[in-house]
Amino acid sequence: MSDQTIGPGKTVTLHFAIKLEDGQLVDSNFESKPATFTVGDGNLLPGFEEPLMGLAAGTESTFTIVPEKAFGMPSPANVQRLPRAQFKDMELEPGLVVSFKEPGGELPGVVKSFDDQVVHIDFNHPLAGKTLLFDVKILQVA
């Protein structure tokens, strides 16, 4: 691996786009400031770092990232049943994102379903179970 290719500890500056398989855009910085990270610093999931290894500045490519290498598969254990009384002043609807205070900060959850007694909240990552397309343009490797 040359000094100009991506590898462990290298600082990489790139433009990226993350899309769903149907082409729906999830996130992109192609129209804004590029992102810079150091390989292995934890800012990028390993499943997104792996396909970049060995690439050089100037490379443009698209990679398919399977759920197990991205945000994992949804876990039924991450869908919680909470008392409806906890949401007494809220107008609930399926898909509503609700923020819960946790010791480490805030944890978002998505309302899956509800009735007069119980609200089912999904704490899985919104991209869990999704195959993603990862478009990259490598600008600099140092």
Image (cartoon, rainbow, N blue to C red):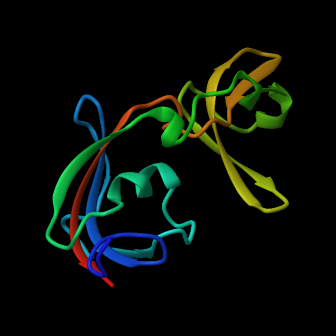
Left or right of 40 in this view: 24: left
- Can you say whether 122 is above or below 30 in the image? above
**Residue at left offset 70%, top offset 50%:** 107
| Image quadrant in which you'd find residue 72 | top right
| Image quadrant in which you'd find residue 125 | top right
**Residue at left offset 80%, top offset 20%:** 118
- Can you say whether 114 is above or below 124 in the image? above
Q: Where is the C terminus found, in terms of image quarters?
A: bottom left
Query: Where in the figure is residue 126, as x and y percent of width and height?
Result: 52, 38
Query: Where in the figure is residue 53, as x and y percent of width and height?
Result: 36, 61
Left or right of 103 in this view: 47: left
Number of callouts: 0
**Residue at left offset 52%, top offset 67%:** 43
Query: Where in the figure is residue 92, as x and y percent of width and height?
Result: 62, 29
- Can you say whether 66 is above or below 60 in the image? above
Q: Residue furthest bottom?
A: 142
Give whichever of 119, 129 is nearer the camera: 129
Q: Where is the N terminus found, in terms of image quarters?
A: bottom left
Left or right of 36 in this view: 56: left
**Residue at left offset 42%, top offset 54%:** 50
Give whichever of 122, 87 is nearer the camera: 122
Q: Residue furthest front?
A: 1
